[in-house]
Image (cartoon, rainbow, N blue to C red):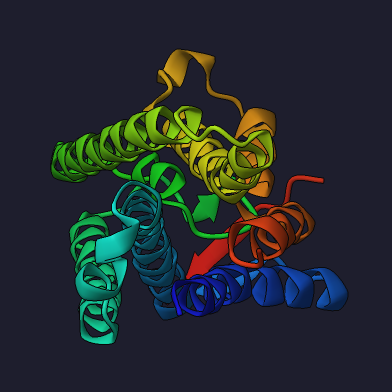
Amino acid sequence: FFLLNLSVLDLGSISTTVPKAMANSLWGTRVISYAGCAAQVFLIFFLFGGEYSLLTVMAYDRYVAICKPLHYGTIMGSRACVKMAAVAWASGFLNGLLHTVNTFSIPLCQGNTVDQFFCEIPQILRLSCSDSYLREVGLILVNACLLFGCFIFIVLSYVQIFAAVLRIPSEQGRHKAFSMCLPHLVVVSLTVITVMFAYLKPPSISSPAEDLVVAVLMRNKELKDALRKVISWTFFSSGNIDIALHK
């Protein structure tokens, strides 16, 4: 159930940026409408926020399955799973709405060229000539704190999981438990590292080439598909393009 929700969110996040970038490439254009740019920002933060919330829920699911197996059916019943997934989707929606409203209420007066192949908030904020952009920076920092808090929760969950796994007398049992958990932890770590580098690195070390590489890492379909296949197999089966904004 959680993997199905995660797959839908992942499919949505890929579909948010790739089709428009491909269309611009095929038609030889570098433009996106103002409304289309706002839609991209909203969907990116909505889907990513929901995806990371769901990864946090999945860590709790693994914790209950391994540390409290006799209570798993009671704690993680169908109703509880639906509520957790609904909270993940709702948190993503709220995250996307706040960032979109905050970003596009800021006056842009430094041109209309976004130095990226999709609409990304740090690139849009560079077009601002008002101190009101600090509101969005503050919101990004709050998001980073929440992201880090979820990461700490996931790490603590896995500390208890690994402690329980190491007490398993059978080597085969330990191997199976580790194979269930490690792919999920790899996906979470990759997500946190790329996002924090993309949004929290100092402007002095920022460059268009680096921003493009990080963006591709965050949205590379082949990389995500490979990691998702690892999860489905082991976890659950036992060039720079500028785009111009036009209203």
**Pick the front one: 232 or 170:** 170
Q: Which residue sits at x=50%, y=66%? A: 245
> What is the residue that sits farthest to the top in this orientation?
204
Q: Which residue sits at x=56%, y=45%? A: 177
**On screen, 132 above or below 79?**
above
- Say whether residue 131 is left or right of residue 99: left
**On screen, 176 above or below 46?**
above
Residue 131 appears in the figure: yes
**On screen, 93 above or below 202?**
below
Residue 230, located in which quarter of the rendered image?
bottom right
Residue 91, located in which quarter of the rendered image?
bottom left
The image shows residue 87 at horizontal and vertical percentages of: 20, 72
Residue 19, located in which quarter of the rendered image?
bottom right
The number of numbered discs placed on residues in the rendered structure image is: 0
**Pick the front one: 78 or 214:** 78
The image shows residue 240 at horizontal and vertical percentages of: 74, 45
The image shows residue 29 at horizontal and vertical percentages of: 75, 71
**Pick the front one: 80 or 141:** 80
Q: Which residue sits at x=22%, y=36%? A: 149
**Pick the front one: 149 or 238:** 238
In the picture, the quarter occupied by the C terminus is bottom left
- Say whether residue 137 is left or right of residue 164: left
Q: Which residue sits at x=21%, y=54%? A: 106
In the picture, the quarter occupied by the N terminus is bottom left
The image shows residue 179 at horizontal and vertical percentages of: 64, 45
Residue 90 appears in the figure: no
